[in-house]
Image: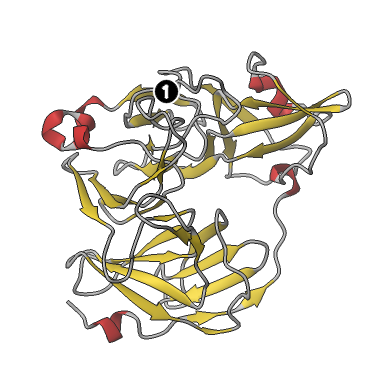
Amino acid sequence: MPSHEAVTKMFALRIGVFSWLPYFALAQSHIERQINEGVNDSTLFTDRATYIAHKWFSSIVVGNYLYIDGGEIFYQNGNDTVQTEAKNTYSIDLSSSWTNATVSIKQIDNAIDGRALNSPKLWPGLDKSTFFSYNGEKAWFTTPANPPANKLYKFTSDGVGAGQWSEDDESYTASSNFTNLARVAGSASACGPDTCYVVGGWRNSRTDNTISDEGKPAAGVVSYNLSSSLWYNDSLISTTWQGPWFWGNLFFTDVAGSKGILVAMGGSTSGLAGENPHPLSFEYVYLYDIATKTWYTQSTGGDVPDLPRAGYCAVGLPGTNGGSNTYEVRHPTVVIVSVG
């Protein structure tokens, strides 16, 4: 295994400017908000005259298509803003150019097990034609929440922007260690070549119908091996993490001679019971050596943002040396984090 110094040779941060695609912009605040759980979101999402925003969704690229899943849709109904759960999965063809006015959005039925969740984690399958959905929570306006049982869901694409959802039965049998896990929200996730990871998060009545209160922080590093379908749960608590961590972002970076490194940044920590939440500055990032299951703290340099970030957007990009070791953090500035 390379030394800690070799793994973290350089962290450079730079500030830039960005703009989100307006079609997916967040809705502005409205004094009056209604909730409509019975409206089919299919027409709402494609009606440019009434559509406002799609929040708390997740997305993944499989083949030539961008798939969008989960979240809540906000739309205009007269003078009111109405929100509803996104009950479909959507796909957009990336093989040709489009604009906000011309984009074609396919709608795929997601009516399986009542699985309309905010912020699910989407993981790519090894066969390049499937992806998985794990974790997430029911919308806060749903009463009672009635979240479905904790399961892993699998989407099999047809190669032309459609496909079908199913339960991935093999991955959550008792022998796979899955029965010891619980669904969480607010976690961070990243995938390596054959394993996906979930770190931290919260359990609440919107993730687990056996919980009556609104907050039980999760302090685990959960991993799922896509080849063996086995699950593992290691403790997050260490000299680096004094308590649970949530609403940050996680990235995987390959390091020669090791199983890879997880890079955690932003978010917040709290006490073991969720007390005293503390936002984390970008003056530090946190590294998890997968081979040794050890956390390290690494200071950063450059123009470090003056405010912490939680619940922000981030994306991993190929680095200038050809490796996937550069990450953009957007909220609302661009922070470039380079791992040398």
Q: What is the secondary structure assignment of the residue under circle 1? A: strand
Q: Position of residue 55 (x, y in %)?
A: 63, 39
Q: Which of 74 and 168 is in front in this view?
A: 74
- Report the residue that reaches farthest toward the left: 175
Q: In this view, does 338 lie above or below 110?
A: below
Q: Quadrant of residue 293?
A: bottom left
Specify the quadrant that holds the N terminus.
bottom left
Residue under pointer 1: 164
Describe residue 53's horizontal placement relative to residue 300 as left or right. Answer: right
Q: In this view, does 42 lie above or below 216?
A: above
**How many numbered marks, from 0 up?**
1
Q: In this view, does 123 lie to the left or right of 102?
A: left
Residue 140 in picture, x, y percent from top left: 57, 31
Quadrant housing the C terminus? bottom left
Q: Which image quadrant for residue 178?
A: top left
Residue 333 on image: x %, y %: 66, 67
Give the residue displayed 17% in from the left and 68% down from the top.
292
The answer to whether one can see residue 35 in this image is yes
Q: In this view, does 237 lie above or below 307?
A: above
> Where is residue 56 drawn, in percent x and y?
58, 41
Task: Give the residue drawn at x 11%, y 33%.
Answer: 175
Evaluate whether residue 267 shows in this view: no
| Residue under the image location 38 percent in, 30 percent down | 211
Task: Give the residue furthest to the top.
Answer: 38
- The residue positioned 56% from the left and 39% from the top of the image is 57
Left or right of residue 12, residue 132 in this image:
left
Badge 1: few (under 14), some or many (20 or more) residues near its Cα, within 10 Å?
Answer: some
